[in-house]
Amino acid sequence: MNAAERRRLSKLLSLALRHDPAALGVELDPRGFCAVDPLVEAVSRRLGFAVSRADIEALAAPPARQSPAARRSGATKDTAKTRFELEGDFIRAGHGHSLPIVGYRPCVPCGPLYHATVRSALPAIRLQGLRAMARQKVHLSHDRAITLEAARRRSRDTVLIQVDVARAFLAGVGFYESADPRIVLSDDLDPRLLWHLEQASAITAP
């Protein structure tokens, strides 16, 4: 499978496992997992080229375990984000769900967490905080670089927000694992738990 085919496969799996399993005629369990074997058949029919079980499993492999050929081809641009996770004969999207799922694994983040967004969203965040919106959870990261990179796909004019993790825990906010160790999922976050780093100031006035 070449890099272009791998990207098409990753995007199709993201659509089905995050948002619309009916697009491939597959079913997800309450935790968002889908059996790999019927998924292999469904994506092969939809994409028009042969997809193997190994191709799908490779998308859930951490970057260090991906093949040298895949890394040289540039295929890791998508897979390096580790969008999927395997559990036996089942696979699910590791984050980004708009479908309701259960079984998020709680975690205790170590160090600061960041969220980046377009500058035009900042007034709403000042009033409402960070909300999952169409997703099930808010997406945060320990990695400032990938946080800004994701926001800059929408606009070059972005802002970086830091979460006060300690206060969030005291306020009862839940934090959860993602398939990608650089990404942490969370419940909605009140503006009092956020700092706008560009101005080094609290999101809300004291």
Image (spheres, grey):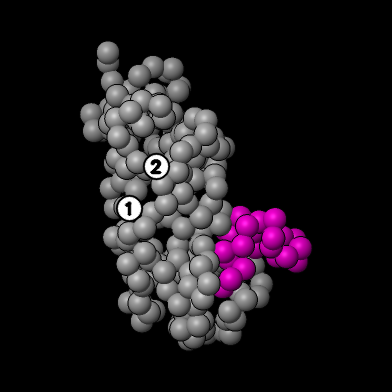
Looking at the rendered structure, the secondary structure element under dot 1 is loop
Quarter of the image where one finds residue 7: bottom right
Q: Nearer the viewer, residue 72 or 40?
A: 40
Looking at the rendered structure, the secondary structure element under dot 2 is strand
- The x, y position of residue 37, in whole percent, is 50, 83
Q: What amino acid is labelled 2 in the image?
A: Phe
Q: Residues within 10 Å of mark 2 (few under 14, many from 20)?
A: many
- The x, y position of residue 53, in whole percent, is 58, 79
**Dominant secondary structure of the residues highlighted in magenta in the image:** helix
Q: Mark yes or no: residue 26 visible.
A: yes
Separation of marks 2 and 1 at Cα, in angstroms: 15 Å
Q: Residues within 10 Å of mark 1 (few under 14, many from 20)?
A: some
Indicate which disc residue 186 carries: none
- The x, y position of residue 23, in whole percent, is 35, 76
Q: Is residue 77 left or right of residue 21?
A: right
Which quadrant does the N terminus fall into? bottom right
Indicate which disc residue 135 carries: 1
Which quadrant does the C terminus fall into? top left
The residue lying at 29 percent from left, 60 percent from top is 100
Q: Nearer the viewer, residue 174 or 191?
A: 174
